[in-house]
Amino acid sequence: MQDNSPIYIERLAPQRPTYKVAVVTETYPPDINGVAHTLSKIVQGLQANGHLIWLIRPRQQAAQVANSDERLEEVLVKGMPIPFYKQLRMGLPAKRHLTRLWTLQRPDLVHIATEGPLGWSALQAATKLKLPVSTDFRTNFHAYSQHYGMAWLSGAILAYMRKFHNRAQATMVPTQQLQLQLADKGFQRLYVVPRGVDTHNFSPTLRDPALRASWGVAPQDRVLLYVGRLAAEKNLQMVVKTYASVKGAHPDVRLVLVGDGPMRAELQARHADIIFAGFRTGADLARHYASADIFLFASKTETFGNVTLEAMASGLAVVAFDHAAAGEIIRTGVNGILADPASESSFVMGAQTLLNAPDTLRSVAQAGYESARAMGWPAIIESTEAVFARVLEGFAPVDA
């Protein structure tokens, strides 16, 4: 008797390759900054996808003990405070230690997230051992120098950064805009890998009437918000100027600054009507985001600006200069407001437009929220893995 019953063939997805990756960074949680936050998300995502991570970073306290689990092993090295960022530490040179470590346990790839002394040591050790290297371009240090009385160092810093990254087989940058800018300055092998946002942690549902009441605002009043370091390179004077300008037509509007930094004392002394919320993290930070209405981000020195996505995911309408993440994600009048970087008045007018038109504010905030929801971390991890795969496929040591 012939059996005509159908035959079912199970189609199995091809198994993704897994790597042993040595991740080298000067900063990592519990440090509070964009680099530490996004890198921790990348590391967690890589672990979840089966990769083995060796995390090399500075010891933050003398008694600190390295963590390890099934897919993560920490290697702690000596560090020292970073000038102007004394709450953070940078790793001291460790070429000999890393060479010995990677000789005994050879990684498939070395990924360097920061360009400090520890990062340079890792680059030297990897080059000596002929290990493939990828890097991140995460901070515009050459632009920052102009805000600390060291503009004369900008060219030298840029030259160092170019030399550093061009010795790697790939450099990941967060936006196409930055990719074009760096390519124009002689940087090579640049790949765009954007940042993501955790839409479970940042949400409009976390809006807190009690928190708003503590700020002295009524339910119908509007709150302007800034989140980040209170420092000159963040262009905070533009945020304060915008607040002062819109108060004439909207006297009930308030400005809340979340964060800390060298400008806090000066700003508090000059602006008694501004609310200084200090450092906020986790669910508390998310409540502060969601309890505001308009996010003002005037920085022109970011490589990405994670706070832009966090604000959009929290249901805020964002006003930002056409730069970094905002320039890639926002369409003016649709899901945010972009201002001309050469025009301070356009930034002020962006905030004024939203305050004058409540319906526009609501529609822009809703569209921004939908845009942020599409930028979850799993896709970012896949892009990172794709760069790793490309490096390993075509690896050939780059001449120093």
Image (tube, rainbow, N blue to C red):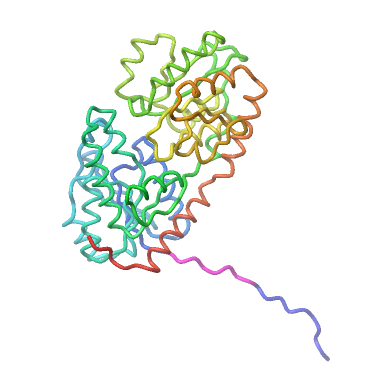
Which SS type dominates the magenta stretch?
loop
Residue 251 on image: x %, y %: 54, 8
Residue 328 on image: x %, y %: 51, 41
Residue 214 seen in this snapshot: no
Q: Give the magenta part as a residue range.
A: 11-18
Q: Residue furthest right?
A: 1
Image position of 356 with respect to 48: above or below = above
Residue 221 on image: x %, y %: 59, 14
Instruction: Indicate the quadrant where residue 148 lies.
Output: top left
- Which residue occupies 37% across, 36% down? 33
Along the line of sight, the residue nearer the viewer: 42 or 77: 42
Image quarter (top left, top right, bottom left or bottom right) of the C terminus = bottom left
Does the magenta run of residues contain 260? no
Image position of 184 with respect to 355: above or below = below
Q: Residue furthest left?
A: 96
Residue 201 seen in this snapshot: yes
Image quarter (top left, top right, bottom left or bottom right) of the N terminus = bottom right
Along the line of sight, the residue nearer the viewer: 125 or 147: 147
- Answer with left or right where residue 323 lies relative to residue 267: right
- Answer with left or right where residue 362 lies relative to residue 304: right
